[in-house]
Image (cartoon, rainbow, N blue to C red):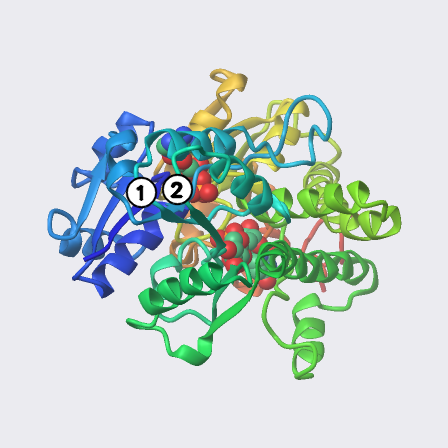
Amino acid sequence: MTNILCIGAGYVGGSTMPVIASHCPEHRFVIVDINEARIAAWQSDQLPIYEPGLDEIVSQTRGKNLFFSTETDRHIAEADIIFVSVNTPTKTFGHGAGRAADLQFWEKTARQILENSTSSKIVVEKSTLPVRTAEAMERILNSNTKGLHFDVLSNPEFLAEGTAIRDMQNPDRVLIGGRETGSGRKAVERLVELYAHWVPRDRIITTNLWSSELSKLVANAFLAQRISSINSISAICEKTEADVSEVANAIGRDERIGRYFLRASVGFGGSCFRKDILNLVYLCEHYGLPEVARYWEQVVLMNEYQEARFAANMVASMFNTVAGKRIALFGAAFKAHTSDTRESPALAVCRTLLEEKADIVMTDPYALDNACQDLQDLGNQITYEPDPYAAARNAHAIAILTEWPQYTQLDYERIYQSMVKPAFVFDGRNLLDHKKLYELGFNVYPIGKPALTRLVNHGIEAA
Ligand code: UDX
Ligand code: ADP
């Protein structure tokens, strides 16, 4: 039996470890966190994150070979392998503020591991980190005078929220980076063996440490770049009566381009894309590559432009003012099937519309608590309403900001009847049946497609 510890019971630790534990019943897994409330939630029936399939996996493994605890020091001492998945937010202070990763939690963890270790261990970076973080980690850990040896591995997580369990069960690849020394290779092999319980060997890629660390940033930068690319094209489509879905389909059929991640939207969100690209930008600057830095920075700037463009289009279409108008925002989560609101474009749009003095009501099936926390600086300016029908009542406009499938099933005739006229729908996810909404009486503004509106000078005039 191997004692496996995961430090950090957030999205990454909390969704990966239960899956590994379910496939490796002979090993013992403990997940620790400094946040007591979070650990209490992991021990209850109300898990702290919503992720399809997670409840089942946790209930199968918890108390058998998976345990949650706040006693980090004790569990470090017992562990053979330690996964570290503490948060690495963007630095908000000092050199590199707004770009570089804030590694203070990470470094504290390294020192804590060192203090409490009485045996040699494998330490695995699971959080996304700047390239060459492992080097700093190795230096701290191997500076010990206890005669202990630590092998640091990089094993970045590629799972996407909302499909985390499915992604973990059937990953495109598992990436493991390690040192090319005898002990480094052995450490890599131990981690390979763990994943090989359910992942075919040819999907487990082993590389040097730096390739592994960099690949995580690059994967996210490439994915986000595709979204910014198609979003930039959505702006041209709106000017030319081209349809961005048709363009995406036409270009995506080319296998070299591929059809995924070409859905134009109000913008990308989530805890990774923005943070990782800014991190990449910072690294490029650090290594004296300003042209490369500017190239990747543009992906983030295009995303900010798209969010701002969406909100500005709402104001312009509603006769250049939304002051005092009730606007129902459908969706707070950064994408469907998650309660996560980190970097959600819904919150960016919400803030802009509030600056325009709109009366905002926000609805979401799972993410309202998180949205309320993220927007607490705005006090009670926002109404949070779980029922979309109630949210839309007496509203001038609805904006679809998260692609929740349940929004396609609503009775829009009933919604239309309850709204102030002229009634508007701004579909930031191209989720709804626009023609049908138009026939019901709505003025419809999709992303990257001609608007369907009866309002002269505000789109295409009705036939
Ligand atoms: C992402 C990566 O996909 C994952 O590999 C990495 O480990 C973490 O970051 P995640 O942030 O969970 O995962 O969500 P993802 O599905 O990638 O979506 C990110 C954002 O892009 C969402 O806001 C989503 O709505 C948006 N998006 C995605 C689009 O706007 N259009 C698309 O075509 C795809
Ligand atoms: P991610 O999406 O990368 O998993 P989260 O913010 O969801 O990030 O989770 C990171 C978790 O790590 C948080 O629950 C936080 O409390 C925890 N954490 C941060 N520092 C430490 C530490 N030194 N010891 C234990 N847990 C920590």
User: Does residue 398 sit above or below 260 in this rendering?
Assistant: above
Ligand 2 closer than 8 Å to label 2 CB: no
Q: Is residue 420 visible?
A: no
Report the front residue among 163 and 452: 163
Residue 344 can be seen, yes or no: yes
What amino acid is at disc 1? Ser
- Residue at image position (44%, 63%) is 188
* Residue identifier under label 2: 148
Residues under numbered marks 1 and 2 in contact, where contact means CB atoms less than 8 Å apart: yes
Q: Which residue is mark 1?
A: 119
| Rendered-image quarter of ligand 1 | bottom right
Q: In the shown orientation, is residue 8 left or right of residue 347?
A: left
From the top left corner, tell me how far across and down residue 208 is, in percent: 58, 62
Q: Which quadrant holds the N terminus? A: bottom left
Front residue of this view, candidates 148 and 457: 148
* In the image: residue 220, left or right of residue 82: right
> In the rendering, at what x and y percent does residue 426 appear?
61, 48
